Image (cartoon, rainbow, N blue to C red):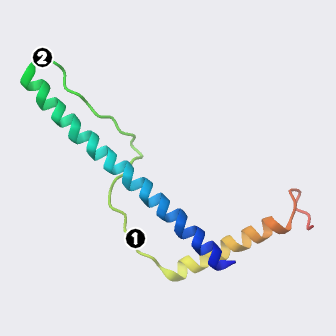
Amino acid sequence: MKSAMVFVAVIISTILFWATSNVCKYNFAVEKRTNILNVITEEIDPTIPKAKIYYYKELNCADVELDWDIDRVIKNLEAISVIIYQELTTDIRGEPL
């Protein structure tokens, strides 16, 4: 059971890391194209307003430290396995099956 949970956790973590890095790469590409667009419009007609980019404040593209504390991971997996076991062995009202 624990090996399956570790496998699922690794897959979810990989997908989350991939999605986050792609969002940050997309934002970098948008910034680059906006800067190019602003240079071109400045050369064509300086009276044309410049393009602006807006981001959510919650979006943070800083590098993430992937420092793993194996004891913390094991404790978290044990807690998650207990919660999942309790959910599988009780019905909605909380009564044992």
Residue at screen point 28% across, 39% down: 30
Q: Which is more N-terminal, label 1 or label 2?
A: 2
- In this orientation, which residue lies closer to the viewer: 66 or 17? 17
The tally of labels here is: 2
Residue at screen point 10% across, 25% down: 42
Circle 1: residue type: Leu
Q: Is residue 12 above or below residue 3?
A: above
* Residue 18, x across and y down, in percent: 42, 58
Residue at the extreme left of the image, as rendered: 43
Q: What is the secondary structure assignment of the residue under circle 1?
A: loop
Query: How many other residues sit within 10 Å of disc 2, few (<14), some (14-19) or many (≥20)?
Result: few
Query: How many other residues sit within 10 Å of disc 1, few (<14), some (14-19) or many (≥20)?
Result: few
Q: Which residue is mark 1?
A: 66
Residue at the extreme bottom of the image, as rendered: 71
Q: Which corner quadrant holds the N terminus?
A: bottom right
The answer to which image quadrant residue 97 occupies is: bottom right
The answer to which image quadrant residue 3 occupies is: bottom right
Left or right: 34 with respect to 73?
left
Residue at screen point 67% across, 70% down: 80
* Residue 22, x across and y down, in percent: 38, 52
Left or right: 47 with respect to 54?
left
Left or right: 53 with respect to 14?
left
Q: What is the secondary structure assignment of the residue under circle 2?
A: loop
Circle 2: residue type: Thr
Q: CA distance from mark 2 to mark 1?
A: 47 Å
* Residue 33, x across and y down, in percent: 22, 37
* Residue 14, x across and y down, in percent: 47, 64
Residue at screen point 91% across, 67% down: 96
Q: Is residue 28 above or below residue 71?
A: above
Q: What mark, if any, has residue 47 been given in the picture?
A: 2
